[in-house]
Image (cartoon, rainbow, N blue to C red):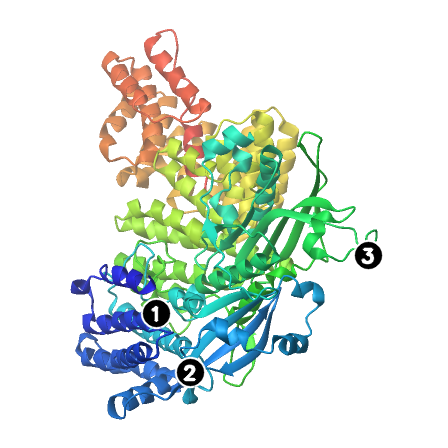
Amino acid sequence: MMAQSKTDSDSSVDYTHCPIPKTHRRLVEAHLLWHQTSAQYQYPEAFRANLNATIQALRNVTFVLQSEKDLFSNFDAWYAPWQERLKADPVLQWVKDARNKVVKQGDLETSSKAVVKLITWRDHVLAELSVPPELPPALILRNLPLVKFVSNAHVPAGDLKSAALIIERQWSVNDLEGREILEALAHAYGLLGNLVLDAHSYLQEFACIPSNGDNAHFSSMHHRTGTLACMVLGIADRTHTFELSTRQELEPVSWSPRDGPKPEAVVARYGVETLAQVAKWQEADPVLLAERVLFMAKRMLRKDKSHIRIIFIRDGKGIWHPIMLNASNRTEKHLLIRMVARFIESVGGDALIDVGEVWTLNLRENASYLNIDNLQEAPGRGEALDVTVATREGILKTYQTPFTRGRFGGIKLGETVQLTKYQPYYLQPVFEVWGRQGTVVLPDGKRIRRIWEPDPLDTCFCGGPKRFGECCKRLLDALSKPADIGKEINSAITTRDFVRAEVLARAALAQYVIWVRQHTSPTMHVARDLHRLFVELDVPALDAHVRQLCEVLTTNGHSDSCLPQLRHLSKAVGVPELSVRVTALATELLIDLGDRGGAVKEIESLGDLERVNDTLALLLATEITDLPAHKKREYLTRAVAGAFSIGDELFAELRLVRHLLGGGEQDEAIRRLDSVIAKSSGKNSERGALADALSLRWKITENEEDFRAAKGELETFVDSEHRRQLAVLLMEHGDFDEVEAVLAGALNTADPVGQLITIDARLRGGQINAAHELLLSIKSDSLAARLQYPYAVAFTHVALCCDDAELKKLAAANLRQLPLSGSQMTGHVNDLLEALTDDSITPRDSIVARFRQLFTRTP
């Protein structure tokens, strides 16, 4: 079956678009032959024939690659490091020598042995025996002195009652020092597969490799074994399992994948809605996800009166797999956990959540009862719902909720407790896998922690649609210093080489996301203080990288790719706090594009906002969703408290001040404003916040001293955004002629924002015809989506002031075409529509406030 599945996958390889088709074919050929060899494991002649063919196919991969060297721009420079790496690997050297022997001298001298293991909650190797390859496992077992072997293993009697025996068949050769031969060939294949994949990356052509994630012929960096997942699982084809007490061979135990319930089914059956849903950003935190699983498990237990055993396993790509386990006794439980461990090893699983019912017993009160196989019959036993979360990085938490059953089967839950000294010994096989995968052995024998590495076949970490190997990898590999990329971006922007700037900005973002996955993500829950420090640095840094890339993409005419890239990044970044920030940036982008409905859906994808503390996300939620005043104040206060930078904090504080003013809390607003002014004064990086605060203070006090302070601060800026802000300040002060002077540059360059502000100033100054003339000069069909709303409002004001029937009709049409979101915006548009049809209503509500909301939102 395994070999057939690989044949099926072979048909999906499009060699016509492969940069090295001959080499790629040889690699696939070796893969298929490996599985044919595995399928003939019990048949010596067929096994040897396929083994010889597999060895030759593996050796031919490098031969054929060198025959295609002319396809590379500098093959020798690229291949030299690989050549040294291949020469240093003892297994590949054995493959080389074995191929020569097979071709020139005949078959390898192979030996067959059986490894006998006793299986309890841990593995005990009882014996390694040389046996004829055709000898049936049952006959091997019958001739073993089991009593002696088991006695030497010193296994407690209680564990022996549920123990199993596994007989694993192994072929080997002397030169492999006892290593199983298919395992060695799988290692060799994995290394050669990495070589072939790197060649594709160097040539930046991946069209021949399926992009749906089913890359059957290449191992993933996230699996950590360096071996194909199917080859890791191949050990099951050469093992046989027996029950120790009866010596009867056991049928293979099984598990079954379980799809998550549909949201509507959850609501209907368990009576939960948003609280039951898990947002994508929460999946990055296994502890947070375990708490959500516990919440749902309680609901399910109450409703269904039982809870099946489910283990959720997160693979190396961050995807959670729910596995339903059906073990009828402890023996099957031991075997199933080994299957779980093998699956984790094959997919590089780094986290699991185990949920199910357990029996409990107070040993102080029942010290004489030691029969753990029948714990449900023990006097004083209890039942509990058990949720355990464990990760490769060292997280281990168990939540236990005792419960009792009523007379008619009803479930009464007790208080959930977190067990502090609980050791889930049954997970020992998983911990052993993580012990191997979590570290690497250096040439000197020293073992160090293994860091996360990007996979060339992953969607690129810049968020773009290409794979990492064909997008940013080659550039990042060529950088001598990480800081070099920042200098090159600045240079490209200065010389207006925006194509180069985009390539570099992508690489810079990918580089930072990789850094986050390697350093910030592993510290979650195991080094909280360090994690918090990393996050405080990462949020503003990642924010800056994303904004830089989106700005360059827009300049290059690729603005349409910003949103899908942000959505991919929110899933790929691997840290909840950063995932939320990227989703907030996507929300902000949708607002700027004029899609407020899409922005609302984007912010709602974060789930329960009571669990969100990101400053930008909370600020945007108060802006685009209909919240009561007290809830807005709560969110804005949390936005201030949760800020990761002084800039975010001051911006959030200013938003809170405006909210307080809207609620009539002027004293509290001024107190907070003065705090912002004090914190931002003298800090060059916070001059923008100081200017905002001074301007806002004058609007409250209408004090000339405050006006001069705000004007003086704004006059120190030369950028267009602050020039507009100065113009608004002057207009509100009544200095309409000065507004024209400040915005002269904007009018000369036909800047639509400056034009719209000038229209408002002319209307206020009574220059209605001049305002009308300027309005007609704006090319409305080329306006950005975010300007459609203020343009429609400005058009309405001009139409009302001119009292022109045709202009009013056009203004009403513009208003009706606006995509509206939120009661405040809808109410304002309805007021304007009413004004257009009611001659007794005069123009009101300046557009200036709308501009301030649109152009001073970003921290």
Q: Residue 59, percent across and down?
A: 28, 82
| Residue contact at pointers 3 and 1, CB within 8 angstroms | no
Q: Is residue 217 left or right of residue 339?
A: left
Q: Earlier in the sequence, mark 1 or mark 2?
A: 1
Q: Amino acid at mark 2?
A: Ser
Instruction: Identify the residue shown where x is 32% and y is 28%.
Output: 791
Above or below — where is 325 with respect to 151?
Answer: above
Q: Disc 3 versus disc 2: distance between alpha carbons?
A: 49 Å
Residue at the spot of label 1: 39
Q: Disc 1 versus disc 2: distance between alpha carbons?
A: 16 Å
Residue at the spot of label 2: 172
Q: Earlier in the sequence, mark 3 or mark 2?
A: 2
Q: Is residue 163 left or right of residue 171?
A: right
Q: Secondary structure at mark 3?
A: loop
514 or 494, which is in the foreground? Answer: 514
> Mark 3: few, some, or many residues within 10 Å (few <14, many ≥20)?
few
Q: Residue 520, percent across and down?
A: 53, 60
206 or 305, which is in the foreground? Answer: 305
